[in-house]
Image (cartoon, coloured by chain):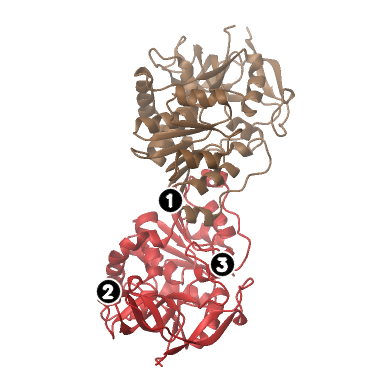
Chain colours: A red, B brown
Amino acid sequence: MTLTTRQIRLERTPVAIPVLSDFGLTEVSLPILQPGEVLVAPSHLSLDPYLRLQMGKRHLSGNLLPGQPVVSELVGKVIESRSEPFRPGDIVAGFGAWQDKTIIEAKGLRQVDFGDLPPSLALGVLGMPGLTAFAGVTELLRPGPGDVVLVSAAAGPVGSTVGQLSIAAGAAAIGIAGSEEKCRWVVEEAGFSACINYKREDLAARLKTLAPDGPSHYFDNVGGELLRTILRALKPHGRIALCGTMEDYNSESRSPGPLPMEIIGARATLMGLVVYDYEHLRGPMTQTISTLIRQGRFAFREDVTPGLENAPAAFVRLMQGKNFGKAVVALVAK
Amino acid sequence: MTLTTRQIRLERTPVAIPVLSDFGLTEVSLPILQPGEVLVAPSHLSLDPYLRLQMGKRHLSGNLLPGQPVVSELVGKVIESRSEPFRPGDIVAGFGAWQDKTIIEAKGLRQVDFGDLPPSLALGVLGMPGLTAFAGVTELLRPGPGDVVLVSAAAGPVGSTVGQLSIAAGAAAIGIAGSEEKCRWVVEEAGFSACINYKREDLAARLKTLAPDGPSHYFDNVGGELLRTILRALKPHGRIALCGTMEDYNSESRSPGPLPMEIIGARATLMGLVVYDYEHLRGPMTQTISTLIRQGRFAFREDVTPGLENAPAAFVRLMQGKNFGKAVVALVAK
């Protein structure tokens, strides 16, 4: 008997912000499971900004071309396994196609067991975004008491985790986000000292009030003009982790970086962060963040879209900045 | 009796590379020495690229305007003192006007006593350039055995010191310089493993041969395209000290910095270096470098122009990159 599955594929390379017609829904048959492979029914698909770079052939993890299924990280249940130690019923995470059922090589899968916490967190604050933030805070920024950590995209899974880990380390956190609703959550739920709505407020002026000496640390998900503005406001000898350039993701152009003279004048340290380098920190990250969650000292939010067929719309929303929390698609078991 | 002195002043703000007619030689009378002041007869004036930025009103230490005497660091002998502990005959260093005799506030002066080593080194490898290099190597780059430190302007006082301190720390050094003669000195005298003549050689290709994994560290005095080329060649997780942007000094424009995406892709750390922050390291710097010199493990070069009246021509040569070694003007006692 041939198994079939629905599949979301890229139909054409997006121009600027992706639109629905860049994607298509199709029915494909699954090949026979081979040794070393596992058949997984995803419960949650991860929507991440870097996918836009793959579609534009500009990400170091590879390209996504028209005609190919969209592949992202996902969490799901093992249906059939031809590899130890995976068994039917196991909850696993790994990279797989946006399908109701998808075949994944066992070596790219990991078991998910967070006890009382939901497995979908393996895509968010206990997954790649959490690991990104954990590496940024513990390996690169290293804030401590007396420090002020500024975070862009502060309502997202990376930014909110950076702020909350910094607070746990004794520092104060200031967020930057794009709506009043997000800013409220960042302060009231995630415990940041303040949050600046960059769409409505004068960032430089507000920063001067909030941190007269300038922030000592900045975690950057945006790049471009925002980065240069903050470099000018930074406390001397401040540290900046560069993690993403959201300003560029929907564009062929790349926004300019800070000038060497500006970096020198600020006595700043800028550090490039690629999460793939920090796989060895996954254990400590999971331990640290899940403990903070259980202690009630760590807030997280998911932005859940139900139904595989709605994944393209959810991705478009993400790239428009309309998501609020970690964007995932929840699949209904078929 | 009124004392008079010759004086070099800026006549007009230079456009692009300075020319002789931007400067003038005049005779001025010296005011009566006030309490707290010291009258110094300079033996050596320091020529430094940052002076060009002051003339363009673009340096954080202040501006130099038409009609004002050129002021730089200098070494000289005390003629008259109205401040303890300075006495006639003392050898001192500090910032003063380009004159045969110049009045300097005592609080900006320091005694120079290098024993058997020449006092003019207080302007070079035992002065601000030495301190710049020492801070860059010991505080920012921190190379060790197995590392490969790439240095631009490698025949200059900062670059040659960066390389030699890195070698003393167990690393290998590769230089970049602008002539065969400079490259020969960098390798044969200063002990670098290799030196790339950027005017004749394909830097990226040569680097690939010399350091197949890429340099682990880069000390940048140049900025601009060179910095971006080297960032692309850098070993992952490499460290870059940004110290100057020679490419911009003679221009109103400022060359672009590396893109955030390029810094992220390289997993690089970029650090801005301002020597004024490291005055507390002057003692350890002097101790370390003078010991290396006496052990025969440290080469230095001075590019000496005799005569106050020739200081403008010497500065023009410096900004044309024609100097070879620390550029100083030697004054004949009048």
Label 2 or label 1, whichever lies nearer to me, is: 1
In the rendered structure, which amino acid carries the disc numbered 1?
Pro
Same chain check for tags 2 and 1: no
Chain letter for the residue marked with disc 2 in the picture = A
Residues under labels 2 and 1: Cα distance? 37 Å
Q: Nearer the viewer, residue A70 or A184?
A: A70
Compared across the picture, whether B303 is left or right of A120 comes to right
Q: Residues within 10 Å of mark 2 (few under 14, many from 20)?
A: few
Report the residue marked by disc 3: A198
Q: Exactly how many numbered labels are in the figure? A: 3
Secondary-structure class at tag 1: loop
Based on the displayed image, in which of its 4 quarters is residue B303 positioned?
top right
Question: Which mark, residue A295?
Answer: 2
| Residue labelled with disc 1 | B236
Q: Amino acid at mark 3?
A: Tyr
The x and y percentages for residue B275 are 47, 35
